[in-house]
Image: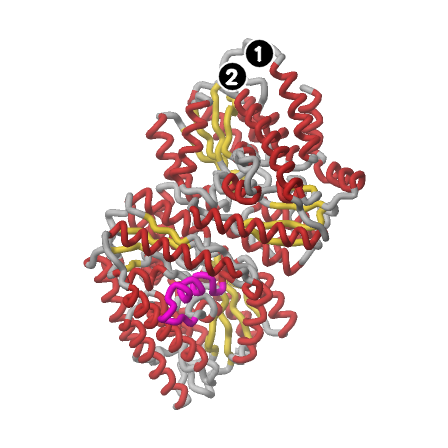
Amino acid sequence: MHRALKIMADVVQNAPSVLQDIKAQNEIKMIGYFHPVFPAEILYAAGLHPVQLYPRLDEPITLADDHLQTYLCAYLRAEWDQILKEKRPYLDGAIIPRSCEAVTFLFQTWKRHNPFDFIDYLNIPWKNSANTLSFFTKELQRVKKNLETFIHREITTNALSDAITLYNQNRSLLRKARRLRNAQNPPFQAIDIFNMVMSGFVLDKKEHTRMMTTLLSQIEETAVSPEPSPVRLLLSGGCVLDTRLMDIISAAGALVVADDFNNGARSFHPIVTEGGDALESLARAYTTVPCGFNTAIKDRFSFLADAIEEYAVDGVLFAINRNCETEKFDYPILDQKIRERFEIPTMLIETDYPCAVGPLQTRVEAFIEMIGGKER
Amino acid sequence: MENRKRERPAFNRDIAAAMKKHYSLTRNRKPLAHTLMSSNPLIEVAYAAGIQPAFPENYACVCAARHASPAYCAKAEAHHYTQDLCSYCRNNLGYILADDMEPPSGGIGDPDLLLLTSSACSHYFKWWDTLQEIHRKPLVFVNTPRVMDPQNMPDFYVDFAKEEIKCAIGEIETILNISIAPEKLAHAVHQSDKTVAYWQKLLDLQKCIPAPLGLSDLSNALFVLIVMAGTKEGADLMEKIYHETSLRAAEGKGILDRDEEKHRLLWLNIPFWYNLKILGYFENRGCAFPMSDYCQYIWGVTRMDGNNPLEGLARKSLSGELNSSLDDHMELLIRDIQAYHIDGVIAHSNMSCRVLSVGVLDAANIIRKELNIPVLVLDGDHADERVYSEAETMTRIDAFLEMLGG
């Protein structure tokens, strides 16, 4: 494994202690947020360390049951549980976007139990119009102002502009890594892309960008191994944290060449225009992030269809969390549209916190075998 | 305590007639728009435009009450709309996909137009988007924000909502090639406001002991408040409901007699539409439900000025329980628990309604701790009775009533 990839994997594996070290070394405040629809550039420009929130998978949910019912998203319940257990000592606050109802209304519970100094909420538009763009820009201004009050200083135009440039560069590198998956034998496994993206939610953006630059420059010089082309899959869903799914896919002889996850391609989707009104540019770009909760089916299908064509996908695996209502709602029509347009097989698997590997393995192996992967 | 069928207020018959007429119109009148109930400013706009609104969500309640929802939900599930999704949505999608069932109340017609707001939960956005995919009809969407802190709501929220409604009116006019006369919109808003005014006075009467109405009567009256919002018929009917209730209150007449009413309970969240008889079970044990958060805070909370309809409709779309902070909500609840002399709470942890259920456990804890009032949390669903366990629910209710002294 490439050294940078190894570091990224370690960062993901040990995210809490890495974040704790970053905080101690840099004496920096850290703000958590859910979903890639929040422009973390604003936090970065404020001199704060943005942390996209994801739970560790090694902790049974206990304390969160007092606040969140078991029919709500298990990832969210797990994250809240770990916050209540003070497993996020590095955090100083959080920003919660309007998204699915479980996350949206966690804001109220969060505010009431107030585990950190700062909490804010951001309305995300669910349609794209001049009026919603203007509104979203004002929402970002409101949040920026609240952050300025929190840090007792102004977030300057230059700082915002620099943060946008840096984040654009970072996303451009991740998109480049994504494009490399298009090779007949891509240089990266799904787990590598997972670690690249997820480490970006932990590390300082400059550090992560340096790491990605090094990784890609060296990968590009590496000869591609002459292995036969495996089954090429696209994974779609809210997010997958249990990497054993990727191991199962790989062991069954398939390759994940594209994804449609919050902790995958959606997170590096926005391209922010540089120059001009920074907040308006952020608003314009982040409105296009194709998450399930803010995006109409036709636009989600367009995102998926582009990926299916570009990455010569042989099959689509919908990996959707139990109780993820927005992804579950879109699935039947997305599935139908994909089958009709591309005549490729699809399958839905339900993931959980953590996944029950046995049944998952049987189904995924059967699906891949049907497409032309290894026979068991 | 005697088990008996109690005499319900006469207005329930008027409401039943209005419902029958409404469902007939949804099959026969054009243009028909499918729209939603929660803080929806497009209801008044629809009536002003001569559009007949239909409410798949209300129809899901009708189906649930007639025990048709399980079959519709199962049909939707067979088309991969899983049980994680709200049973109102599954009921509606199952209704569309089923061609072998006799629909309760004759069903609702196919839409010519889809009218959506984001005042309700994210499910509705997905639901109406799915309806657009199925019906291939134009969708007009008022994308109102969620207000998390009403006391500190930024001014631009109202301006934004006004502009959204204004754009929606323009879109409707273009789609249907009509013009919505400003005086018709003003009239609809005025009628809607009149309905709300009587509704608020009606809720106030429920503070009387005994409570003049039961929760099923109030839930029935919601039909008038929401589905008929913006019509003269609705305003007149709500006035009639208020006057009858007012008379009952003046005469000291309740669903329970004064000496029968031992406890006054608060119902949190949506009722079990398929099992409203459970309210009779409580009544037969001396428990009245003078209020519920569902009737009290979600709808009919905003007064509107017919002379400034856009402002009123914008404020309507930004109000209600879904646009509230937990602290404000708890303050209201605590105030009303005292004002309505509540001494016990039934909290429905409704797996289909995340917006009303996230926070229910917190609310239950706060009520127990701050008011020392017992709270029973019941797991269930508003429309899908397959996830409801009668035996478990009744055992828990019996234990609760025994503890309460019922």
Question: Which of the 4 image quarters holds residue A295?
Answer: top left
Instruction: Name the spot of residue B286 as percent of width and height, x first.
Output: 47, 80
User: Is B315 in the magenta?
Assistant: yes
The mark nearer the N terminus, 2 or 1, is 2
Point out which mark residue A183 bears: 2
The amino acid at mark 1 is Val
The front one of A283 and A99 is A283
Q: Residue at x 52, y 25 (%)?
A: A256
Quarter in which the N terminus of chain B is drawn: bottom left
Residue located 55% across and 27% down the image: A175
Question: Is residue A54 visible in the rendered structure shown here?
Answer: no
Q: Residue at x 36, y 30 (%)?
A: A339
* Marks 2 and 1 close (CB-CB < 8 Å): yes
Q: Which mark is residue A148?
A: none
Please give left or right for residue B362 compared with residue A18 in the image.
left
The residue labelled by disc 1 is A224
Q: Which residues are magenta?
A: B303-321
Along the line of sight, which residue is nearer the eye, A47 or B65?
A: A47
Chain assignment, label 2: A
